[in-house]
Amino acid sequence: MRRALIIGCNGFAGTALRLELASSGEYDVYGVDIASFDQRTRAVDMLDPEAAAAAIRDCKPDVIFNLAGQASPWVSWEKVNLTMHLNVDLSVNIVEAVRVHCPGARMIFVGSANQYDLDSVEGELIGEDTPLVSNSPYAISKNTQEAMIRLMARKYSLDVVFTRSFNHIGPGQKVGFVITDYCNRIVKLENGEIDTFNYGNLDSWRDFSDVRDVVHAYRLIGESGRSGEIYNVGSGESYYIRDLVGKIVEMSPAASAATELPPRLDDDKLTHYRGDISKLQADTGFMPIYDVNETVASVLQAYRQGYVFPSKTDEA
């Protein structure tokens, strides 16, 4: 049994990763978060270097997954300092603690496809060698996180792997993301809280995955990923956001009657951006298995059952 520590274990992806690791039967799983709800989770402010060191010293994990952080480019403009603290300082505290207390542990730091400069992409595939962008405090924070952790790993000979994860969705995800925002609006309309709602710009093709596929990739990266590497994590497929939103609108007679979806553009008028996951597949054997269209439908059903959150932040 490998001992795994999930930092940010109570969040959307953290909860899914915990289930993924536990169900494999190969891990003794522990977590830290700002609050604790069970004996396996320790309440820790990981921005406090001493508290972070104590948590890692006491657990002495074989593998650490850092899913904590501020994950919204839009929120990052409102909370610049907090974004930098959560995405950079917190990660530095983890590495410092590992260096002292369990230097042989593998660390997986979760990044984002929002780090990529889409204007520089040739064709449709976004590879790990795509240039990075500096168009938000969020993007800068994640790029800085990578650079700083890579520097420390080289200096202290630590085992670090990075991801740049594309959009992932599933029941329990908070508002602040395109699918959950529209699910939230539809449920409010169905409950009579609003009469209608307007649509934003839905004319983009992006890579979407079920969160269960994403956390399965994280487990495989922890097991088979090459130290020092960056891995795109996604489906390798492109989905038209207008079609995904249209699917959940069609599931709601109230939304269909009270709103009008914008017209669908021809497929050749937009670039079908998708992540190149070939390195992930070659090194770990990862293959996505969940149908994103079914996942989108399940998110709406979850919101109808009470998964309506006010926060615009989520992990990594």
Image (cartoon, grey):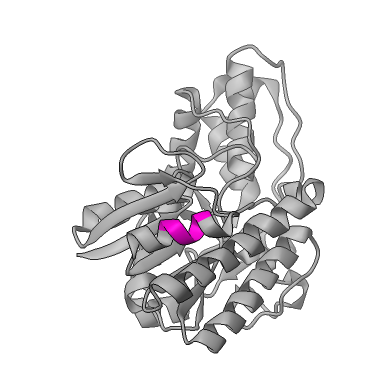
In the picture shown, does residue 279 fall above or below 267? Answer: below
Count of numbered tags? 0
- On the image, the x and y values in percent for residue 60 come to 34, 65
**Side (left or right) of 39 relative to 151:** left
Q: Which residue is at 38% across, 35% downward?
A: 37
Query: For this rendering, which residue is in front, 88 or 239?
Result: 88
Where in the figure is residue 180, as x and y percent of width and height? 58, 38
Q: Nearer the viewer, residue 179 or 220?
A: 220
Residue beneath the point at 63% across and 49% down: 241
Q: Nearer the viewer, residue 139 or 154?
A: 154
Highlighted range, magenta: 51-55
Residue 293 in view, yes or no:
no
Residue 233 position in % (x across, y down): 49, 67
Q: Main secondary structure of the magenta part?
A: helix
100 sits to left or right of 265:
left
Residue 283 appears in the rendering: yes
Vertical placement of 310 versus 10: above or below? above
In this rendering, the answer to whether 213 lies above or below 105 is above
Left or right: 300 as drawn, with respect to 138: left
Residue at figure coordinates x 68%, y 57% from the top left = 85
Residue shown at the point (76%, 71%) measured from the top left: 133
Quadrant where the C terminus is found in the figure: bottom right
**Image side of residue 142 versus residue 305, left or right:** right
Location of residue 83 (image quadrant):
bottom right
For the residue pair 14 and 216, the one nearer the viewer reads as 14
Name the image quarter holding the N terminus: bottom left
Give the x, y percent position of residue 65. Answer: 43, 62
Residue at the top extreme of this rendering: 192
Residue 266 on the magenta segment? no
